[in-house]
Each structure stands twice: as C-alpha cells, then as structure tokens.
Image (tube, coloured by chain):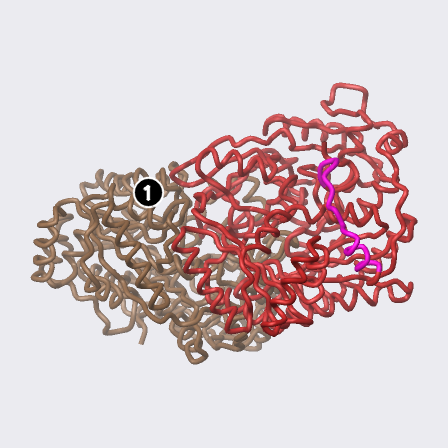
Chain colours: A red, B brown
Amino acid sequence: MRRWNGWGEEGDEYALSDDARAFLAARIGPGRAPHDASLQQVVERVGASRLPSSGHGFETDAKIRVLHARGQSFPDWIALRCGRIGPCADGVALPSSHDEAAQALASARKLGAIVVPYGGGTSVVGHLNVPASDRPVVNISLARMNRLMVVDDKAWLGTFGAGTPGPQVEAQLRAHGFMLGHFPQSYPYSTLGGWVVTRSSGQQSLRYGRIEQMFASGRLATPRGQWSVGGVPASSAGPDLREVVLGSEGRLGLLTEVSVRLRRLPEEESFHGVFFPNWASAIDAVRAMVQADLPLSMLRLSNEVETETQLRLAGHPQLILWLQRYLGMRGIDEGKCMLMLGVTGTLAECRRTRRDALAIAKRHRGVHVGKGMGKAWVRNRFRGPLLRNALWALGYGADTVETCVNWPKATALMRAIEQAAHDALAGDDERIHAFTHLSHVYRQGCSIYSTFVFRSAGDADADLERWRKLKTRVSEVIVAHGGTISHQHGVGVDHAAYLPAEKGALGMDLLRAVAREVDPDGMMNPGKLFT
Amino acid sequence: MRRWNGWGEEGDEYALSDDARAFLAARIGPGRAPHDASLQQVVERVGASRLPSSGHGFETDAKIRVLHARGQSFPDWIALRCGRIGPCADGVALPSSHDEAAQALASARKLGAIVVPYGGGTSVVGHLNVPASDRPVVNISLARMNRLMVVDDKAWLGTFGAGTPGPQVEAQLRAHGFMLGHFPQSYPYSTLGGWVVTRSSGQQSLRYGRIEQMFASGRLATPRGQWSVGGVPASSAGPDLREVVLGSEGRLGLLTEVSVRLRRLPEEESFHGVFFPNWASAIDAVRAMVQADLPLSMLRLSNEVETETQLRLAGHPQLILWLQRYLGMRGIDEGKCMLMLGVTGTLAECRRTRRDALAIAKRHRGVHVGKGMGKAWVRNRFRGPLLRNALWALGYGADTVETCVNWPKATALMRAIEQAAHDALAGDDERIHAFTHLSHVYRQGCSIYSTFVFRSAGDADADLERWRKLKTRVSEVIVAHGGTISHQHGVGVDHAAYLPAEKGALGMDLLRAVAREVDPDGMMNPGKLFT
C-alpha cells in the first residue's frame, strides 16, 4: 500500500548506514526524530464536505478527500507530517472514461465548484494544492483511466487513458513489442497525463526525448466542451496547440486521453560510471559528448559534493574504499566528479557509442570504472525519493530545485545555487548540505538539479520558514542567472512568482488570455502556473 | 537582379528539352504562350499612396510598393503576370535594427495602418497579400536586417537579423565553422524570420530538424511593445511561447531577431539514387529506414509519375535510356519509384549509415544507382521553382500542395490528392499532370508533396478559376483524410478556410484570443492564418 504521508510503498525503506548518518551529522549536525501525525488524526480533523449529500457523482468521504489533498512538495510534506493539511476538496470523482470525466466536469460546473485535477499525486511544486475558497472544490482523479486503448503498429503510436502511471505504460506497451522511454524519478506513480501537463522529462531523455517530443495528440474535457490537439507527425498550420496543453497544469481542462510516439525495445542497455579529476574537465567532457551527437541515452554528471555524498551513502564502504584507491592511483582524488553514462540501442550501436563516449572521456582525463556503479544506479533509479522518508525519520528535511541554462552559464549558476542555499540559513546558524548534478544535457546547455538537506527545527512552522528562505533565495539566484524556474517539475504554486521573469508581462497576459478563453469562469486549478 | 514576376534571377532559366515539351503535350495537350504585363505597366496602374507626404518613415514610391505587393502563390503569380496585382501597400519601411522596426510599427500605429510584414517574398499561400481596407496599409520589410549579430560557440547559438536569407545565414555561419542546415526549396530568398513564423521545414530536416527545433529564442516588436521568447535549451515552466510565435504568420508582431541552434560542418555528404520496382515496396523501405533511426539527412521518395517525369525532364535522354535498361535488367521497369537518400556526417558515420540504408533498400528490392542522380539533384535542389517560369512561357500553369499524415493513411491520401486534381478539371475537359513525392519522413508518418501542371486558359480569370477548383478539391480531400492543411508552407489566406478542421472551434478561439491580446487593434497582417 502506498504511503499516505511520504514516498513509496509502506515498508519499502531506504536504509541509511551508520557511516551515512555520521557523514550527515558531521556536515550539518545531528537531527531530532519527528513526531508525525497519523492518517486517522488527520481524517478526524477534516471539515465536512460542502457538497449536497447526493446527485453529483463525487465521493465525499473524509479519507478519500485527505488522500487527494496534497502532493510531494516540501510544504505538502510538512503539512502531511504535522497533520495540518489545510483545505481539502469537498469531493473526489474517479471517472473511468473521457465521457465520465466530461460528466464530472459538467457536474462540478453545475455545483459552481473549482476543479483540481489529480493524476499520480507526485507534484513537487504544489500543483494539487486545494485553494481556500468560498466555492466548493472537487478533485477529479484520472486514476481509473489507466489502460492502453489503441496501438498503431505502423505509425508507432499508443493511446492511453491519461491516468496511466509509468510502469503500466511500459508493461502494456511491452506486450506489443513497444516502449515509450519516459523515466522521471517519479515514474512508479506519476502518470502520462501528468507528464504532459507539467512538461516532464525523463532520465533518458537524451535518447527518448522530453514528453513534448513523445506527445502526439491528446483529448481534453474543458469547461467549453471537448477539445483535441495534435494528430499528425508535423505541421506548419499555425501555432502548435499541443504546446499550449503541454505545461498547462490543469488550467485548460482535464487531459483524458494521450497518444504517444513509441519505440521498439532496444537490444541492449548498460550504464557506466566514469570519474573525472575535477568539475571543469567533467563538464567539458559531457558537453563534448552531447555536441558530438553521440547516440547516448543518458549523461548524468554529479558535482564534487554529490559524488562524495553518493559514495558515502552507497552502503558498501569496503567497495568504495577500493574504488577510491583505484581512482587515486589514476590521479583522481579530492574534487572528483562522477558521470553516469547510459548506452542503449542495437548491439553494434551500443558498442560504438560506448567506445566513442569513453574516448572523449579519456581525452578529458576521465576514468571508466565499468558497469558496477551503473547497475547500482539502475537498482535505485526510482528510489531516490525514499531517501526523503529516511532523512525525515532522522530529523532532516530535504528538497530539490532544478533549472536549465545555456552552457556558458552552467557552472556559475550551479555554484551560485549551492552558495545561495548555504547563505539562506546562515542567519539561523544552520548549515545546509547541498549537492548537484546535471541531469539532462543538450547541445545548447544543460539542466542543473540540486538537492538540499537541512535539519528539521522540530516544528512545522519553523521548518516551513527554513524551506521558504531557502527556496526564495535559490529561486532568485536562478532568475538572476537567466535560468528557467523549472526544467522538469513545472510551476505549480511554488514557482508561480518567478514565471513572469521568463515569460515577460506580455507572455503572462497571453497565458491568462488562453485560460480565460477555455475556462471563462476560472474553475480549472486556479492559482497554479499563474495567478 | 531578381525577377519581379516569377522565380529566380533574371536570365536564370530552367531549360526544357523538346522531349520534355513533347511529354507534357502528350499528357495534357499543347500550351499557348502567354501575354505578360511589364513592370512598367503595373507600376503605372498603381493608385497613389494614402499616406501623408512625409514624416512617417515609409517609402511611398509606386515601384517599391509593387515589388512588395505579392508573394509566389498561384494567385500571386497570375496577378503579377496579367498585371492586375490588386491592392498595394501605401508605403514600405525597411528598418535596419529592432529599434527601427519598433519605430516603424509605432509609426504605422499612429497612422492607423495595417501592417503586412515582409521577409523574402517567397510565400506560396498568400501571407503577403495586401488587404483591401479603408485603413492605410504598410509593408515592413526585414530585408536590411540580414546580419549575424552574435555567435555563442559554447552554446552553439547564432543570433541573426530576422530578414537574413538562407545563403547569407549559411555563409556568415561558415566563417565561424558552424552551419544551420535549413534548406527549404525557397532557400535562396526566404529568410530566417519567415521560416520561423511559417513553421518551415527544409530538405534535410531528417538530420537538422524543422525550424521549430532550431529556433532557440526570438525578439519581437509588437503593438504592445517588445516581447522576447525562449532562451534556454528546455523548460517545464508552462506552455512554450516560442511555439506561439512559430506559425504566427505576422499576426503577433514583427519578429526582428532570431537565435538558432547551430551545428558543426559535416565531414562528408552525399546523395544516392535508389530505384524500387513499385510504390508499395518503396514506401515500406522508407518507413523501415526512418523507424530504424538511421542517421540519414534526407529521404525523398518520388511516386511512379514523378519518377517518370523527372527522368523525362532530366535533359539527358541517352543517359536515362541507359539507366532504364540497367534497371530493367534488375527487374525494375514500369511503375518504378525513385528514392533520393541523403547521407551526412563524419566519414565513419556516413559509411555506416549508407551501408545500413542500402541494406534495408535491398530487402525491399531497391537498386542503388550510385551518386550520379544525387549530384544532379544537388545541382537543382533550389532550382525547381524556375520550372514554373519555363512552364508558364509554354502556356502551362503549375502549383503544388503538401500535407502530412500518419503512415497508415499516406498512400491512400497521396492517391486521393492526385485523383482529386484530375477530377477537378475533368468537367472543363482539361487534363492535369499530377505527381507526388514524400519529402519529409518521421517515425510516425510522412509529408506528401504533390505538383500539378495544367494548361493556361490564356485568360487570368479563367486560370484562377481552374486553380481554385483544383485547390478546393484537393484541400477538401486532405481535410477528409485527416491530413494537416500544410506541412511546410503555412496557412496564409489560401489555407485559412481549412484550418478550423484541424484546430477545432475552441482551438481557433484560442488563436484569436492570443492575437487579440498582443494586437488589440487588429493591425498585424489581418486575414492571414485566421479571419
């Protein structure tokens, strides 16, 4: 059963070794175990639904409303853990088809209700927050729309219910000899429709593309009726309206059905660890690889602190010691940076690509340590968020920010983000453990993904305040450096204040004009993306 | 000097052999040489500018107004040839910078004028038509904004004035060791800004991408002030507003500066002719190649009639006879289809890709005839439109339509388009010579590009009527088959009636809402894209 107040399945733990605990304690001080509220306590505190007792099709049971009230942002996390979850929807609908979703929307409209669409509940930026409103609020969950409806094996298209989560996307396609290849860290729970409306990007986007490139067409239920976008491979017939749905974060209606571009299963896949003596050589190597158009499936480069952290948290101190010695003999020591390199394709392609990539790495003093690190990475590729549970149990909060920027700005922005994080809590005399990797690379630039671990204050308000300082400071730095406020998580409420800096006043007006046109009464997910 | 009433430079002719003339006469009957108006005649007939005599910055000379009045659509062509060019702008501005363009726009606004932006004048769907209006109309030409302003050799970006035509884009980049790779047939004259606002696609988009993939950021002068879009490699921060500018056809303002993603020059490039015994095997081979992700730079597949036409028009009857004999011995005869296959990249990549592509071709009974046909194709790759001049001089009109559709519909739609063309003039007892190629291929489907040659009636109104019947019938067939109304030419006025079929009523409302927001007075290129 899925955890109601954290990541993952009940009982699935990310074990932190004593060594890892000591490492953290040394970096930022010892934590204090928290006192968490129970689901029962939270459910009991929830107010009664404001919906009429029947005839509208929404479930009004307190528990189901609580289970849809929050995502996985830091404020969501704190709210769930301390048991003050804030406003809950007044009802939840779980349609099984486009027509049922359209009915639920029509019913919400009749009730004068606000709609918060719900996919896999994995948003980390507040997409799911229920606004405090005089109007009733309902969740419409796409969870029951989780089936592969059509496969076109000539055009290589698959049409799914928008609520299909990652594993069910891939399992249903595999039965037809196809795959999609979208693997964000939230993959176990996040859904195809969620990926589209938040412009998600997966770990192997280098090969498979971002969701923008996969999204062929979609069907929406909107306050103004049914709307379809896309359908042909390419077109010059005016602005591409798929691109308006991508990133619309529920403001334009319910995305109910999604057709995606498929791939055949690769013959082979492997992931390789490569260590560089320092950041400068590592980032140059990665840029050289992507600008050489090598058909790699992943380039994921950890900076010095992330590399050290991963080695300390790996849980195999003897192996790591051996690795460090080997690297030391090759001149790679303090300040080393680890690159995880994904190779996917036909046997011949993989052999060639691996050879070409490692040759570039070597020219930049990179040392290949084989597939062992890669196998460990694969085992844990979707387990990272579990670490948040483990850290919390030790009295630490954790959050991430991410952005994307052109190559000339990448290193400076990465350093500035970490510095801003350190500075944010310096006034409280609290240290932050901050580390970063480049998770997605492009010929033009890269994404920057930073993780922050800090001590819980033992009090929800104080924890939120720490997070707010951190988030504000870091977001301001991102904006000041010309980075996007999000490369893969979306805007939600947490990033909404920073969007005008990159869209411009006129751009924001356009977004508002589009939403107003589709949703004249402002019933769709208000407060998300823009205010 | 560029021709004022046709394609290409004065004196640059596409020679049609006697054999080619006989071929056409046999297919659709002999043509009659036309009587064309002279530029002098047209200039004399143009009404006086309605602009005040000075103080607004627009040139009002009749000749410059005539030279900006029309593009290259069939109605444009007829208008120029018969000398009834319809409304001309009242003035033309030729700004040299973003600020000057913004000034021209402000001046137009003060005059209460409508603005028709002008790039290379190569639109084939009526983007440049000057509306008959009580308001004055001005052209703002970007022709003087033709310089490479900045090269970022780390992010591989180049920023250009939006009026830079193809050859000047590539020549200026080559000096820095870079290239763009956008080669539409209009390349000698069409401009970077024009490519963006019409969502253009070049002959080697298989390698270099459509303009959507190249367009990194842009700066616009709009009725509501300056607006910038894009700038980072990728983002999940809401809908991508680059995608609203792409295909906006002048409705949102003047695109003045464009930053594009660059490539290094390839080590090698070659084009290869491959003949297949029939259409079914040829299209299967092409689909197999693109779905195998072979890093080809072009796949251009001619159908039976286009293959025959190209061989007859090639102007080397002896060589062609030899080729036909050779192919005949290999079992390829009547009904054969020619594929032009582009291979571009490093030496090793080219060798490999050529080998893999030819292996797939062979499995589908394709016969490689070497690089000779490819070299001929390269020589003429941008000269196709000159054929229109030559045909007109013989008394024939020519036009093209293009669309894009998923693989399962491709052959049926191609046949239906040609059949519709034949049917369109059957009532007039006129035959049409119709032939087709697939010019761009995707894993999901392909574009379909058909050419029609028909006899001129010797009278402008009758010619236009023939064209209108043809265009209407073919467009209806495209819509009925679910094709897009344009894969690479845009919407303009000629396709505007068919856009709602693919965008939906709600989609059209969104486009109108966006335009209204940026351009509340409706001064930007009204009537284009949508009404």
- At horizontal 80% and vertical 45% (from top left) the residue drawn is A77
Q: Residue B359, percent across and down?
A: 26, 52
Dot 1 alpha-carbon crowd within 10 angstroms: few under 14, some 14 to 19, many 20 or more: many
Residue placed under numbered mark 1 in the picture: B474
- Front one among B126 and A86: A86
Across the whole image, how many numbered discs are drawn on residues?
1
Q: Is residue A91 magenta?
A: no
Q: Residue A481, percent across and down?
A: 69, 69
- At horizontal 62% and vertical 63% (from top left) the residue drawn is A338
Q: Residue A257, percent across and down?
A: 56, 35
- Front one among A484 and B2: A484
- Front one among B449 and B262: B262
SS category of the residue bearing label 1: helix
On screen, residue A74 versus residue B48, left or right, reads right
On screen, residue B412 versus residue A63, left or right, reads left
On screen, residue B324 versus residue B378, left or right, reads left
- At horizontal 59% and vertical 62% (from top left) the residue drawn is A339
Q: Residue furthest bottom?
A: B175
Q: Is residue B227 visible?
A: no
Q: Is residue B397 visible?
A: yes
From the image, which quarter does the N terminus of chain B lie in? bottom left
- At horizontal 62% and vertical 45% (from top left) the residue drawn is A197
Q: What segment carries the magenta color?
A: A8-25
Chain assignment, label 1: B
On screen, residue B127 versus residue B98, left or right, reads left
Q: Is residue A24 magenta?
A: yes
- Front one among A54 and A401: A401
Q: Residue B492, percent across and down?
A: 44, 54
